[in-house]
Image (cartoon, rainbow, N blue to C red):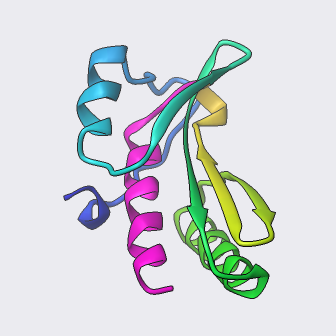
Amino acid sequence: MLNKQQCEACSVDAIALNNDDQQSLLLELTGWQIMERSGIPQLEKAYKFKNFKQAWTFSNKVAELAEEQFHHPSILLEWGKVTVTWWSHSIKGLHKNDFICASRCDVLAEGE
């Protein structure tokens, strides 16, 4: 299970996952999509909540996860909705860390 794995340090010389590896890991997630922006693949999911406060609480949990893992996503907080986007900035692509953190976001959302 991805959410039980540990992120590894991702340096500039790390190798981004190829398309086959991305698709294989994507099968382990629910509701996540790979979006390409400016030629960079990014892993994205929108979470729905009953109100702004629940969305805000979830956003804070994702921010805490990001700090713990020293891997930081884009977090868009809206009324009743949070969109989380993971990618590895240093390699301008997707790394296994992105999929691990995505899986952990799903675990956090189950608690809401």
Is 75 displayed left or right of 88 in the figure? right
Q: Image height check: is 84 above or below 108?
A: above
Magenta residues span 93-112
- The one nearer the camera, 82 or 96, is 82
Q: Position of residue 91 (x, y in %)?
A: 58, 25
Q: Image height check: is 53 above or below 28?
A: below
Residue 48 is inside the magenta segment: no
- The one nearer the camera, 35 or 21, is 35
Q: Position of residue 90 (x, y in %)?
A: 64, 31
Residue 105 is inside the magenta segment: yes
Q: Position of residue 105 (x, y in %)?
A: 47, 65
Q: Main secondary structure of the magenta part?
A: helix
Is 61 displayed left or right of 4 in the figure? right
Q: Residue furthest top?
A: 39
> Residue visible at 78% across and 80% down?
52
> Residue visible at 25% across and 39% down?
27
Q: Position of residue 102 (x, y in %)?
A: 45, 54
Q: Residue furthest front?
A: 50
Is 56 displayed left or right of 5 in the figure? right
Which image quadrant: the N terminus? Answer: bottom left
> Residue visible at 30% across and 63% down?
3
> Residue visible at 69% across and 76% down?
55
Q: Residue furthest left?
A: 1
Instruction: State how many labels appear.
Output: 0
